[in-house]
Amino acid sequence: MNSIILLDVLLLVVLLLIGVPVPLCFAAAVLLLFLVGDFGSASFLVGAGFGQMSSLILVALPLYIIAGNLMGQGGIANRLVGLADAVFGRLHGGLGVVVIMTTAVFGAISGMASSAVAAVGKIMIPRMVERGYDRGYATALVSTSAVLALLIPPSASMIIYGWVSGTSVTASFLAPVLPGVLLVMLFCFWNRVLTRHMPLEKPEPAPLPVVVRDIAGQTRRAALGLAMPMIILGCIYGGVTTPTEAAAIAVLYAIPISIWYYRELRLADLHGVLWRAGQTAGTLLVLVFFSAMLARMLTMENVPQMVLEGFLGVTENPLLLMLLLNLFLLLIGMFMEDVSGILLATPMLMPLVQALEIDPVQFAAIIATNLGMGLITPPTAPILYFGALVGGSSLSRMLRPTLVLLLGAYLPVVLLTTFIPALSLTLPAWVLGYGQ
């Protein structure tokens, strides 16, 4: 049966590489295992898939997607850019900092890296090019910063991780926050270094009162959009609502703000927004269904235990095992986006995580940082390809700044998250009393 498992994994990887839609890749893997294995009746596996999908926490996924789409098309991205530009735009390389900050906040609202690339990239890449930034650098910065959506709550990836692993979703939300903040700081540092020789257009100096009035005005215009993640997280961590109920509140909040306050979304446009969000959510739920079936089949064949034995067969040194764990997650992140990567990797790696005595909440941060790095690591790098389409840049022009940000920012954060548990456990302990 081991050869069949390897063939199944190979089929999954090949289908992903040739561009088959991810849910269909998982469906093909399920079908192959079912045809050659002994798993009883198909009704048992289908029941297992539907049983896993009945979790109330999964209702939060389509709700957050709807809220993110509403705010993305309702003017929030423009106002976030305006506020960040007022605060940082007068610095050397300030537009780069604007991109980093805006993408982090918008990614938190939408919960998806691709949404952040689409919304922020369309606004900021042309603006950066006009002010003297290299197009390849501008596109690379938007694409790499968009992966902060995995780390800044509320994150769709952490909802999936909490569901798959049985870990507290609220604690999982908080685990990657400090690594995300550290990543923002490193991005800002490298932005300063990489732009020092670019012929950037310098903004005209302005008196301090003018700057303060500009910031105050932009803050007032962006306030209701900025309040959205604060309301969501305040409701969750204040004990008022569950993450699913907070997602419903986010939708109810986003509709009037986008339509009647910002007035960039008409009531007639609501149908289109809901339809596109429904398509995205439907694709995710089909993926969840087939991945739940695949996880059940792999568990029945003791694949998680085989993975553990495989790692221990290479080395029993805990330090090397942690590095191998990171490499394994990075490779998964290079071949598939974050949600499918979490669905596949989490049940397979849990025995190894337990053997290494890694806290499951810390593993939430480890898996988020590694999969995020995989999304922008060549040669596959799905977010980089998407960013190139949005920014009209070639991948060759994006390669150098991307590698600098990967090696100088992402890799150190991944290693620090892996080997310093306090980086991911401090906030859950402080806010929720986790582990105390």
Image (spheres, rainbow, N blue to C red):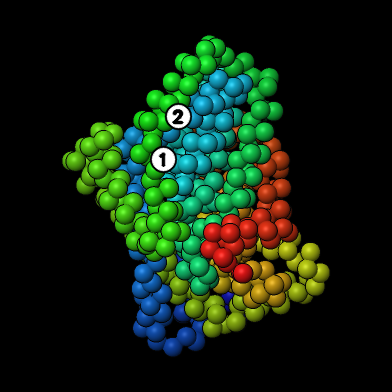
Q: Position of residue 29 (x, y in %)?
A: 49, 70
Q: Amino acid at mark 1?
A: Leu
Image quarter where the C terminus lies is: bottom right
Q: Position of residue 400 (x, y in %)?
A: 67, 34
- Circles 1 and 2: CB distance less than 8 Å? yes
Residue sitting nearer the eye, 254 or 125: 254
Asked whether, in this view, residue 58 is left or right of residue 305, the answer is: left
Total number of numbered discs in the rendering: 2
**Residue 75 visible to the viewer:** yes
For the residue carrying disc 2, how many other residues have a C-alpha within 10 Å: few (<14), some (14-19), or many (20+)?
Answer: many
The residue tagged 2 is 83
Q: Which mark is residue 154?
A: none
**Residue 368 visible to the viewer:** no
| 202, above or below 384, in the image | above
The residue tagged 1 is 226
Image quarter where the N terminus lies is: bottom right
The outermost residue toward the left is 268
Q: Position of residue 40 (x, y in %)?
A: 44, 88
Displayed quadrant of residue 365: bottom right
Residue sitting nearer the eye, 425 or 74: 425
Residue that appears at 60% across and 77% down: 303
Q: Position of residue 264 (x, y in %)?
A: 27, 33
Spatial separation of the CA atoms under disc 1 and disc 2: 10 Å
Displayed quadrant of residue 5: bottom right
Asked whether, in this view, residue 301 is left or right of residue 24, the answer is: right
Residue that appears at 73% across and 59% down: 419
Residue that appears at 28% across and 34% down: 262
Residue sitting nearer the eye, 366 or 307: 366
Question: What element does badge 1 sit on?
Answer: helix
For the residue carrying disc 1, how many other residues have a C-alpha within 10 Å: few (<14), some (14-19), or many (20+)?
Answer: some
Residue that appears at 52% across and 33% down: 99
Q: Amino acid at mark 2?
A: Leu
